[in-house]
Amino acid sequence: MNCADARDSILAHQRGTLTAGDEAAVRDHLATCPECARVDAAERALGEALEHRLPQHPASVALKRRLAALGAASVPARRARPRWLAPAFAAAAVVLVTAPLLYQQLVLVPRERTLVLTEAVNDHLRVLLSQRPLEVESGGIHQVKPWFAGRLDFAPVVNFGGDTDFPLRGGAVGYFLDRRAAVFLFTRRLHPISLFVVRADGLPWPSRRTEATTRGFNVITWRGGELGYALVSDVDVSELRTLAAKLAGEPV
Amino acid sequence: MAAETRWDVAALGQQALAYADTLHNLARYLTGNPPDAEDLVQETYARALRSLHQFTPGTNLKAWLCRILRNTFVSEYRRRRGSPVIGGLDTVVPVPDVAAREVDRLAKIAAEEIEAALMTLGEDARTVILLDLEGLSEVEVADVLGCAVGTVKSRLSRARAALRQRLTSPTER
């Protein structure tokens, strides 16, 4: 056995995973080669340093919560169903949420408001998990907005077409509870940000901009005329606030 | 059948959560900073959930997730960020005069020095060292790195030798 082969086998020798023949050859070599014996000793010291002193970087609780939320939304039932069934499933979801088992939760926060926030986060997760989240790739807001014509029973009013901080990736038609929604996908660094625009009639959409955190995601909702807006992402709420201001045409 | 499949996917997704710390640690050492590491883990998990049907039951879920993470890092993160490969080749320059002190130096090395030295290695070297520390077999490491099984042993040997040299002769970095 030469030195190169011996050094490639030193770790396996130390871990006792060599075959009997290879083990004997490595031992013989180490006994006669001081330099490889030094490497053997240094490898043991390095192994001890790596195993006991290399800093570990575990995932934060917030990240684990977001991963769990992704996993919870990965059950494919809803994504796989035909779109024409969406109103029926949404109605069933409403019934489930209003069931007595959730009574305690519903007395703590207004039921409909919770529904809106839950649906916003669920829809955002479905966008993240979709194989093809975008039905129209963005060439700018003037390409995305006209694409919705004929696909929705309202015209989404969105006057911000993205910039270098919040590029607009594209759009899609989705469902929000019992109604169709215009979905705009922005990004902030690598973080996707979903903007859902829906008819707000019959839903308790806040007239003023309202912030909430649900399952690790930040949600900002507001009303503009007859339309409800929901902005959802895991970016910091201050960054989401900036995008909301840009969407409202406010100076940032 | 559908319900069973749904349960399996949900169960597998739940099992994958158990490796969040491992994935984040690997991501942290690949990207070099916490925000990018979290992005990388989240993207890895989303991709894994979309591809759960491709996972072969009975094989190592941790190794499968590590492979997705590394592929995501190579295909998405590094390309988007245009970040250079730190450290380049894991060459080892013989430094005979420090050889005798190597073991003593390694025994006294501080945690932050090990981390700093590891970050000076190339991505492949860092990855092979970390996957080995995670207890992945040579076959599994080869699968993650996309190389031949026979290559893993020599890559690991060279990577650890390069790390030893950076730790024992820091001025050579």
Image (cartoon, helix red, strand yellow):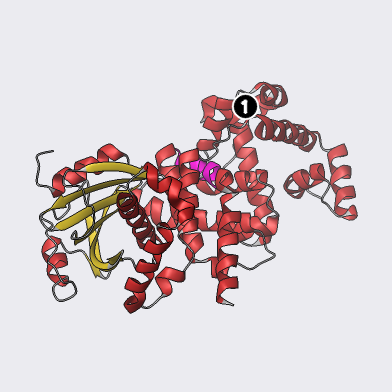
Question: What is the magenta range?
Answer: B23-32
Tell me which corner region of the image, top left, top right, bottom left or bottom right, holds residue A136.
Answer: bottom left
Q: Is residue A97 visible?
A: yes
Q: How busy is the neighbourhood of tag 1: few (under 14 within 10 Å), some, or many (20 plus)?
A: many
Q: Residue extending furthest front? A: A100
Q: Nearer the viewer, residue B16 or A201?
A: A201
Of helix, strand and loop, which mostly describes the magenta segment?
A: helix
Position of residue A25 in the picture relative to residue A90 (left or right): right
Picture residue at 58% right of the left edge, 45% below the top: B22
Q: Position of residue A200 (x, y in %)?
A: 19, 59
Quadrant in the rendering for residue B3: bottom right
Q: Is residue B77 magenta?
A: no
Residue A230 located left or right of residue A131:
left
Chain at numbered mark 1: B
Foreground of the two, A216 or B119: A216
Residue A149 in the image, given as x and y percentages of width and height: 13, 73
Residue under label 1, please give it. B168
As displayed, is residue B110 above or below residue A78?
above
Locate the C terminus of chain A and report the quarter of the image it occupies: top left
Q: What is the x, y in percent for residue B54?
A: 56, 70
Label 1 residue SS: helix
The image shows residue B173 at horizontal and vertical percentages of 51, 31
In the displayed structure image, the side of residue A14 where residue B58 appears, left or right: left
